[in-house]
Image: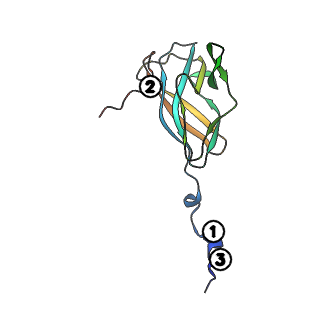
Amino acid sequence: MIPTRRLLLALPALLPAAALAQPAVTVDAPWTRAAGQGGTGAGYMSLRAPGGDRLLSATSPAATRVELHTHIRDGEVMRMRAVEAIEVPAGGAVTLAPGGLHLMLIGLTRPLAVGETVPVTLRFERGGEVQVALAVQAAGARGPAAHRH
């Protein structure tokens, strides 16, 4: 008979690696607004990571550069500022939305037209790379389009 303590210590070796791995970062409702070539765009979404994580960077073939940004109040004016990383809290979510945290797509290499998607690669500290497709909404949209059934 194997003592319980030894069995518990050996248990991780008996389970498949996938059963022990933390679930990947999940991305909900990724979207952007229509914009012209050469200009700027912004990416919005909700990020979850059960054990917590940090979004470190992003890239897209639709932009020459993608930066992580936030809005801060400077007196009576709201200004955008680049941030080094975006924290995804353990057991919670962080929302990238207009007027707050967002991806800044700088130097668009093509127009972003309503109905299209924009590929973006997100790079997380622990979760690695995650591919997303930003759904392009109208230029004045305040959120992602509702899903139609």
**Residue furthest to the right:** 84
Residue 53 left/right relative to 146: right
Residue 47, horizontal then vertical, whole percent: 54, 38
Distance of label 3 from label 2 (alpha carbons): 52 Å
Task: Determine which of the numbered discs, if any, sits on residue 13 in the image.
Answer: 1
Amino acid, disc 1? Ala
Which corner quadrant holds the N terminus?
bottom right
Q: Quadrant of residue 131?
A: top right
Residue 78 vs residue 50, the one in the foreground: 78
129 vs 43: above or below? below
Residue 65, horizontal then vertical, whole percent: 64, 22
Distance of label 1 from label 3 (alpha carbons): 14 Å
Distance of label 2 from label 1 (alpha carbons): 45 Å
Q: For mark 2, give the secondary structure.
A: loop
Amino acid, disc 3? Arg
Q: Which residue carries the number 2 mark?
A: 143
Q: For mark 1, give the secondary structure.
A: helix
Q: Quadrant of residue 102?
A: top right
Residue 35, horizontal then vertical, whole percent: 50, 15
115 vs 53: above or below? above
Q: Which residue carries the number 3 mark?
A: 5
Amino acid, disc 2? Gly
Residue 9, horizontal then vertical, whole percent: 66, 72
**Of pointers 1 and 3, the one earlier in the residue sequence:** 3
In front: label 2 or label 1: 2
Write the residue at 62% across / 25% down.
70
35 vs 28: above or below? above
**Residue furthest to the bottom:** 1
Q: For mark 3, give the secondary structure.
A: helix
**Of pointers 3 and 2, the one earlier in the residue sequence:** 3
What is the crowding at mark 1: few (fewer than 14 residues within 10 Å), some, or many (at least 20)? few
